[in-house]
Amino acid sequence: MANEMDNTYMRQAIALARQGEFNARPNPMVGCVIVANGQVVGQGSHLQCGEAHAEVNALKEAATQAHGATAYVTLEPCAHTGRTGPCIDALIRAGIKRVVIATLDPHPLVCGKGMKALEAAGISVTEGVMTSEAKSLNPGFFSRIMRQKPYVRVKLGMSLDAKVAMQNGQSQWITSSAARQDVQRFRASSGAILTTSDTLLQDNCRLTVREIAGVSTPLRVVIDTHLKSPSSSLLFREPGKVVVAVSEKVPAATIEDWLQAANASDVDCIGLPLYQQHVDFSVLLDWLAENEVNDLFVEAGAHFVGAILQAGLVDELLVYIAPKLLGNNTIAMANLPNIQQLSEHINGEYIDVDKVGPDVRLRIVLSDFARAHHDHS
């Protein structure tokens, strides 16, 4: 049975887990607190993919004090050898007496097996402490494992009257520098950042991570059905891997010529089937999941955003609203021609409302999956 003390220590473990926000991917963020005789004797986070897990780091700090202690872990300890060894073995060897788990790991190699292995070793296990808060740490990881596709977050910067650009395409800058800096954190915590060739042609964007030390730019993806992006675009000049998703009907020779013109070793093209004359976004999501992308961060124009909203492929909207009115000679946040009646609306739920500089930041979940994997307290 969980008690208030369990909640207190699990809350500390959840805070620790966030230390892996930028570099744990594609692994989940995990935190661990070890308590002996009412005192915290060890703390750990999973900081870097391929390096020690949270439990191992906490056990190292606790040393011999771990014997007979209680371990609080935000995610079920792993029971298999992946990039590192099984955490259950480390907990058992250390003489841990009780393990408190926030939520089971959905991975089929782990789900329930870690808990059963601990119990088989004579360790008392409590599962389900602060579950919703722990799941909120890793919606992308849960999405990739459970749905075989990334968690899709769409970023929008707009005016108070929901406009994202003037009719001539001018959009720099509607929102403040504080809002743009805040976006960097969401970029950095994503497995991939996606835009379209139309946005690239309009803005010549880089989609890099700036102003956050020690974080490399995630995979950048450009949807470019007919391969019309200029090979000289700034995005292809910046360090970091770029994938251009084109129609599978684009000739191999055309792709080869374009790649030679781009002259960038980290740029590649993948051919995908079409849906309504454009690269099939659903198939691209499958490809991203197969390549261990947990969270996809979308920064694109109103037509693309409207299309994926209407297709029900967006989990979350990240909306920055500037206290500006831009009037009628503008482009709205999303092109949604299929909505003709009020009853046909797309329904969302606020999970976060914050002030960022002079602007307001809204986080709105749209999918049932997103609603189930966010803390609403």
Image: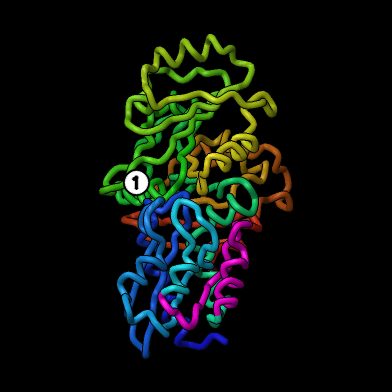
Position of residue 304 measured from the top left corner of the image (x, y, whole percent): 57, 34
Give amino acid for label 1: Arg
Q: Where, by quadrant of the figure, is residue 281 drawn?
A: top right
Foreground pick, 76 / 301: 76
Q: Where, by quadrant of the figure, is residue 174 drawn?
A: top left
Vertical relation: 219 (above or below) 198: below
Q: Which portion, as a residue range, is magenta?
A: 94-121
Vertical relation: 276 (above or below) 51: above
Would residue 148 be counted in the magenta stretch? Answer: no
> Is residue 59 visible from the viewing direction of this image?
yes
Foreground pick, 200 / 67: 67
Q: Residue at x 49, y 13 (%)?
A: 256
Per the image, the residue denoted by label 1 is 180
Q: Residue at x 42, y 80 (%)?
A: 9
Position of residue 51 measured from the top left corner of the image (x, y, whole percent): 37, 54
Q: How is the image coloured?
A: rainbow
Position of residue 19 measured from the top left corner of the image (x, y, whole percent): 35, 61
Secondary structure found at label 1: helix
Left/right of residue 136 with respect to residue 214 in the rendered view: right
Vertical relation: 40 (above or below) 311: below
Position of residue 358 measured from the top left corner of the image (x, y, whole percent): 33, 55
